[in-house]
Amino acid sequence: MDLGIKGKAALVLGAGGGLGGAIAQTLAREGAKVAVADIDREAAERTVAAIVAEGGEAFAIAWDLADLSVIDDNVSQVEKRYGHVAILVNNTGGPPPTPVSGQANEQWSKFFRSMVLPVISLTDRVLPGMRAAGWGRIVTSTSSGVVTPIPNLGLSNALRSTLVGWSKTLAKEVGGDGITSNIVLPGRIATPRISFLDEQKAKREGRSLEDVAAESSASIPVGRYGKPQEYGDVVAFLASERASFVTGSIIRVDGGMIASI
C-alpha cells in the first residue's frame, strides 16, 4: 500500500529511541523527510543514522520540550530544510511512578509543562502551514492509562488524559482544513520505558523482574509484549493519505490488553 507521504516533512518528538525512534524510521521508509527530535542529541543522531543507512532522509534536533521558548526556532529549522511540517507526531516522556494523591504542586506544574503544554504549543505553531497546504496529520501518543488508569502512575494518567480531550476538540476544529488529529495508546510495548516500569514494580513488590514480565505478558491476549515496529506501523498509517477519514479517534495498539470497551 502506498501511504502517500513521500516527500512530506514529518517532525517526531522523543524520537531518539523506543516508540519515537520506531515511528521516525517507519515514516522515513515510506518516503517522508523526518526531523528527529529528542532531548538527547546523541540518541537522535543514532536514529538519523539508522534512517540514512536505509536510504532515508532525516536530521536531528536536540529539543528539551520543557523549554517552550525554543519551539519557533526548532520548527523553523525543519521548515528551512524540508518545508512546512505536514506530519507532527507528539511523543513525550513520562513522569516517574507515583500515586495521584499527595503530589506537590511543583510536580504537577513541572510535568504539565514538559508533557502537555509543549504538545499544544507546538501543534499551534505548525497548524498554519498545514492549513495553507490543505493537508496535515497530527498524531499524539499517550498511554493506556487514559482509558484504564494504571496503578501508581497517577501523574501520567491525569496529565495524558488532558491531551485526549484536547485532541478530540482539535479534530473538530481542523477537519474542514484537511487535517486530522488522533490519539494512539500503546499497551505494553518492549521499550526502555516499559523495562523501567517493570523494574520499579519488581522492587516495590519484592519480586523478580522475570516474574513481573511474565505476569504482564499473561494479561495480554496475544501473550507477549508488542514490538516498537508494530506501534510505528499504526502511527505511520494514521499519518498517511490513506487515513484521511480517521480523525478524533483513539487507537489502541495493545494486543487486546486494555480491559475496557
Image (cartoon, helix red, strand yellow):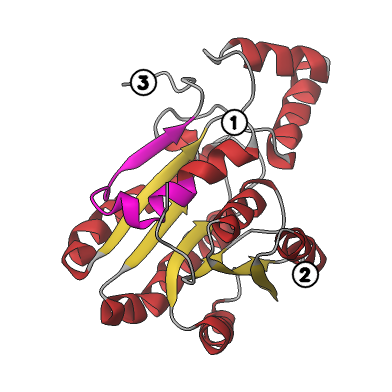
- State which tag comes first along the sequence, 3 or 2: 2
CA gap, disc 2 and disc 1: 30 Å
* Magenta segment: 235-253
The residue positioned 50% from the left and 28% from the top of the image is 254
Instruction: Provide the secondary structure element on which disc 1 rests.
Output: loop
Residues at discs 2 and 1 in contact (Cβ within 8 Å): no
The residue positioned 40% from the left and 77% from the top of the image is 126
From the image, tell me which residue sits under label 2. 41
Mark 3 crowdedness (10 Å alpha carbons): few <14, some 14-19, many ≥20: few
Instruction: Provide the secondary structure element on which disc 2 rests.
Output: helix
Q: Is residue 141 visible?
A: no
Does the magenta run of residues contain 25?
A: no
Mark 1 crowdedness (10 Å alpha carbons): few <14, some 14-19, many ≥20: some
The spot of residue 255 in percent (x, y) is 51, 23
Answer with left or right where residue 10 lies relative to residue 162. right
- State which tag comes first along the sequence, 2 or 1: 2
Instruction: Provide the secondary structure element on which disc 3 rests.
Output: loop
The residue lying toward the viewer, choosing from 82 and 6, is 6
Q: Please state which of the two labelled residues, at mark 2 or mark 1, is closer to the viewer.
A: 2
The amino acid on which the numbered mark 1 sits, given as a three-letter code, is: Asn
The amino acid on which the numbered mark 2 sits, given as a three-letter code, is: Arg
The residue lying toward the viewer, choosing from 105 and 21, is 21
Q: Is residue 26 visible?
A: yes
CA gap, disc 3 and disc 2: 38 Å
The amino acid on which the numbered mark 3 sits, given as a three-letter code, is: Ser
The spot of residue 73 in percent (x, y) is 57, 87
From the image, tell me which residue sits under label 3. 260
The residue positioned 58% from the left and 52% from the top of the image is 26
Judge whether 165 appears above or below 146 on screen: below
From the image, tell me which residue sits under label 1. 152
Residue 49 lies in quadrant: bottom right
